[in-house]
Amino acid sequence: MNAHTPSPSRGKPVDLDAANETTKAAHQTTLLSPRFYTTDFDELDKMDVSSVREEWDVLISSMRSDPNKGHFKRTEEWDDITLDDVPVELRTELVDFLVSSLTAEFSGCVLYKEMKRRGTNKDIKELFTYMSRDEARHAGFINDALKDFNIGVNLGFLTKAKKYTYFKPKFIFYATYLSEKIGYARYIAIFRHFEKHPEKRFHPIFKWFEKWCNDEFSHGEAFSLLMRSNPKLLAGHNKLWIKFFLCAVYATMFVRDHARPEFHKAAGLDIEEYDMRVFEITNECTKQCFPLTMDLEHPAFLPTLRRMNQLAVSIDDLTQKGGILNKIKKMGLQAVVAANFVRLYSIPAKTNELPEFSKMVPAW
Ligand SMILES: [Fe+2]
Ligand SMILES: [Fe+2]
């Protein structure tokens, strides 16, 4: 996992002058989002990859060779930066981006490490050893960036304090697979953007995204193979679940990105264009294993996402105001959000014929 769909603490500015308060806020954001997962590790341990053995062995051997071993170290490419160097209006959202990215990376690390610890299946154990290794590096690298701002997050504390959400293994596959691929798409889209507009790159960490996202790409490759080795997961009524996860993940990302206007403004990124680009890349990636993709060109797709975002803004507003009347209003709006989600879900998906092999290369 990675800085997939980081979730900002919308609307609540962090008092960045008071170190203690900032740390508290960093923790608070971290505690609210993104989630930590747990699953049925015994069931997961029973996965049999023999039907995709050849592709599996190639992937595992590339992970074993550890191509990014030396990547997550600071070099002369790193420009020293303190919070004072960041424009005031950008500070809250940049810190928020880093903290929620860190949480997402660390969430993957915790889940994968647990699978590695509990597993007895050699294939599963080895895969999760490499993936937890990568996510630990990713999380550590972001935490170092936060420490430059004197607001490093206590990861040991997080592991204990954070609430864990239980997901059946198949839901872990859909959610984590998507999270890895969308994470790849987000990182590479940001990296390519700053390649064209280096003057807009307001933090050195973005220079690391190109090789970084290859880790996420190969994590996604592994989940694709795990699902393809168990084709039932990709057929029948499970198609409905796949579509559900696609809608949920895309809508969440759209709403969360819109809650970070200063961040995107400073980067020179149009949020809608950026999100659509990420959806396009993710759609292309998921053709390796999902039997359907979302129809991004459908006339209802973008308008429905826009409505969901407007509703999220209004709900946030009511939450800030508080009071019983606003609570009732909020419940009304939440029902409208649900109706819009149904609308999104009802957009006919595009059928996808699975290719003979799962393997893809990170070509974006
Ligand atoms: Fe990952
Ligand atoms: Fe990661």
Image: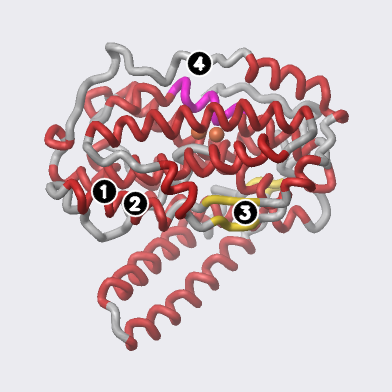
Between 163 and 241, the residue placed more toward the observer is 163
- Residue in view at x 14 percent, y 39 percent: 87
- Local packing at callout 1 (Cα closer than 10 Å; few below 14, some 14-19, many 20+) is some
Looking at the image, is 226 positioned above or below residue 81? below
- Residue behind mark 4: 69
Cα–Cα gap, marks 1 and 4:
30 Å
Residue 184, image x and y in percent? 51, 32
Q: Do the residues labelled 2 and 1 touch (CB within 8 Å)?
A: yes
Mark 2: few/some/many CA within 10 Å (<14, 14-19, 20+): many
**Where 242 falls versus 83 (above or below)?**
below
Image quarter for ligand 1: top right
Q: Which residue is the site of mark 3? A: 245
Examine the rendered structure and indicate whether residue 166 appears above or below residue 311. above
Q: Could you give the CA–CA distance between mark 3 and mark 4, rounded to whole angstroms?
A: 32 Å
**Amino acid type shown at disc 4:** Lys
Overall secondary structure of the magenta section: helix
Name the residue carrying label 2.
27
First in sequence: mark 4 vs mark 2 = 2
Q: Which residue is drawn at 27% across and 11% down?
A: 76
> Which mark's residue is nearer the viewer, 3 or 4?
4
CA–CA distance in space, label 2 to label 1: 6 Å
Secondary element type, mark 4: loop
Q: Distance between the residues labelled 4 and 2?
A: 29 Å
Q: Mark 1 points at which residue?
A: 23
- State which region is magenta: 210-218
Question: Where, by quadrant of the figure, is residue 360 drawn?
Answer: top right
Identity, as a three-letter code, of the amino acid under mark 2: His
Q: What residue type is labelled 1?
A: Thr
Examine the rendered structure and indicate whether residue 63 appears above or below residue 250. above
Question: As rendered, which of 299 and 336 lies closer to the eye?
Answer: 336
Contact (Cβ within 8 Å) of mark 3 with mark 4: no
